[in-house]
Image (spheres, grey):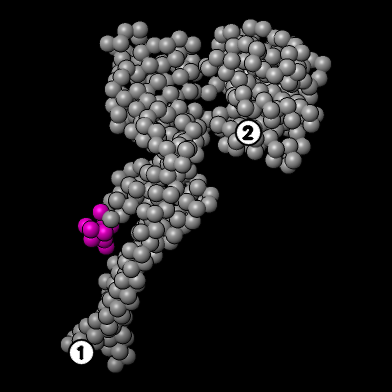
Amino acid sequence: MLDFLPKSISRLLIKINVNLLYEIRLRANKPLFVNFEGKYYFLGQDGLSSAVKNAYFPTAEEVNDALHAACGYSIYAVENQIRQGFITTKNGVRVGICGDVVYEGGSILSIHSVSSLCIRVPHEIVGCAKGIYDRCLSNGLRSVLILAPPGLGKTTMLRDLSRLVCERLTKNVLVCDERGELSCGNVGITSDVVRFAEKKTAFAEGIRAMCPDLIVTDELRLSDFSVIELIREGGVHVFASAHRTDASSIPKGLFDYVVTLNALGCVGSVVSGV
Amino acid sequence: MWLKFAVALLIVAVSVFVGYLSAGKYRLRKSYFQAFQSFNEKFLAELCYTRRALAEFIQKERKEGDFYHMANCALVERDSVRKPSYLSEDEYEYLMEYFHAVGRADAKTQTGWFATRKGELERSCKEAEAEAKNRGELYLKLGLLSGLAIVILIV
């Protein structure tokens, strides 16, 4: 899954259990920082450490090589993703990019001199959303919004919820995966996947083409809620997530349940009829 | 008498075959440049439309021959490519520069770069085809003549 990393860094990862690795922060000439089991550590020749002196310092060249390899050595194939500041590898690993941004005509043309990469390692945890399913969907299909800050497992929860709905309710599910991250894993036997399309396009064309009972999508922005309203009026249910800690800015009546995660994979509150 | 005739025929056949083999280098050059040109054309089309990642593109388009073997080696396996004997140092450097550029930039930049290579490759391909034709004929004739000379001297 992380085969795009330079050998010097891959060698360090052998020393830790990659299944418990959630994030790698690769910064040029700065200490290698990883999120392991929900906590941040420096990573070096002796494995995980809290001391910066034990950390490995990747070079700018290693950061660039990692990005190029993550693109499948084909920048042209992922240029639209790069413009949005991230790419998703074929295995669903999301690589956030930080560097010098070039604009043309008011929109981003490219990002060059890449100095940092935030590599998020996806995990498929079968059954992790069972609690949410039992509390929200035991009486049939409803619309659910999952709220949490980044890195608490919203995407993993959504993926498992989609799988559960397909298996238990056998509904037609349309997964609108804007970043190619959500659909990397089992999203269910009766699901269809639209990848890398903008939400508006994916929703409109997806509903027309696939007639879904449920749309599953990730990372809603405030501007997306008007489209969600139209979908809901059309009788299609929605599972979504958003980078938020409370539901105060969510338009009323849009979702049947709002679930808040308060720790990695932990359901904090489930509020109905928001 | 018949034995002499058979030996003479055998000598001529062998020398013509040696001539054919001697021209093999030029046939390989021709195939190499034809494959190179075809790859460039297909890659330009790829940049305009499907924009698949390199590994997928090469696996789908892969054909027999030295060029595709080298392309797979350099662009998919990310391994070093050995210089074939029929390429000059400059031609080998040109190929390495080409492989280095593939996939390095966005589609617009890549299209511009590879469109420039199109003319150069067409010219090289035509030269290699003409050379293969001329040298092929020359070596066959030389083979035939040397065979006849041997027959006259020996038989």
Name the residue at 70% across, 9% down: A270
Would you say A220 lies left or right of B81 here? right
B38, above or below A146, in the image: below
Viewer-proximal residue among B103 and A80: A80
- Residue position for label 1: B152
Question: For the magenta stretch, what is the residue range?
Answer: B84-93
B107, above or below A271, in the image: below
Q: Position of residue A134 (x, y in %)?
A: 74, 13
Circle 1: residue type: Ile
Would you say B22 lies left or right of A25 here? left
Q: Is residue A197 visible?
A: yes
Name the residue at 40% across, 20% down: A25
Chain ID at mark 2:
A
Give me the C-alpha separation between circle 2 and circle 1. Answer: 84 Å
Name the residue at 62% across, 27% down: A223
B114, above or below A44, in the image: below
Would you say A56 lies left or right of A202 here? left
SS for dot 2: helix
